[in-house]
Amino acid sequence: MATVGLKNLYYAPLTTDTSSGVTYGTMKKIAGAIQVDINPSVTFNTLYGDDAPFATDSSMTEITVTVETADMPLEDLAALLGHTIDSTTKELSAKASDSAPYVGLAFEANKHNNKVRYVKLLKGKFSPTQETMQTKGESVEYTTPKLEGHFVARTYDGEWKRIADSDNTESATLITGWYSAMEP
């Protein structure tokens, strides 16, 4: 399935994830989504018997997610990285001891058939990444903010991702509320 484009990037803080339930805070949009890279790390192991491969199995260890946006408002940066914003000056303060909260992400991409693929990543933490700023030369070159996160399966149900397609008529109700809450 080929996709073209990316839009409607939202995040929501994960406030509870226990064996008895999961809750999220309010979803918030980050305007200017450029790219989301999802890279699951999977390890394969083979069992040998009778001098030949006998069985194979795999296990997923973590999912690295890189998010690139046209802008990252300080309020969103603070919320995603666990920093604070001064209520008077609106200055972001980042401390080495800051701890990023778990969040969920939601976004969409157009499919090659003019329908839409909706994606939710359910539990991850972001960390500060390299920042690059450069002088303007003969031509304009934009540098855009990126965040790298590590996502894992939820404690509640073992899920780490949800996907819905707009060309699946059974998903219509689910898609209608896609950005109103992380959980249906």
Image (cartoon, grey):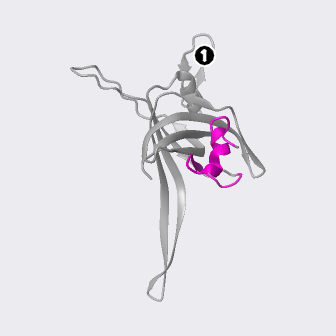
Horizontal side, residue 105 vs residue 26: left or right: left
Q: Position of residue 20 (x, y in %)?
A: 78, 50
Q: Position of residue 114 (x, y in %)?
A: 47, 43
Residue 39, above or below 70: below
Q: Residue furthest top?
A: 88
Horizontal side, residue 22 vs residue 176: left or right: right
Q: Position of residue 126 (x, y in %)?
A: 54, 38
Q: Is the C terminus in the top left, top right, bottom left or bottom right quadrant?
A: top right
Residue 136 is drawn in which quadrant? top left
Picture residue at 60% right of the left edge, 23% below the top: 84
Residue 95 in sight: no
Picture residue at 23% right of the left edge, 20% below the top: 137
Q: Which residue is mark 1?
A: 86
Q: Total label count?
A: 1
Q: Secondary structure at mark 1?
A: loop
Residue 47, above or below 133: below
Residue 146, above or below 116: above
Q: Nearer the viewer, residue 94 or 58?
A: 58
Magenta stretch encompasses residue 162:
yes
Q: Residue furthest right?
A: 20
Q: Position of residue 30 (x, y in %)?
A: 53, 29
Q: Residue furthest bottom?
A: 50
Picture residue at 62% right of the left edge, 42% below the top: 175
Q: What are the residue bounds of the magenta stretch? A: 156-183
Crowding at dot 1, Cα within 10 Å, few <14 / some 14-19 / many 20+, comes out as few
Residue 67 in sight: yes
Picture residue at 69% right of the left edge, 43% below the top: 183
Q: Nearer the viewer, residue 70 or 126?
A: 70
Residue type (three-letter) at the residue carrying disc 1:
Asp
Residue 93 is drawn in which quadrant? top right
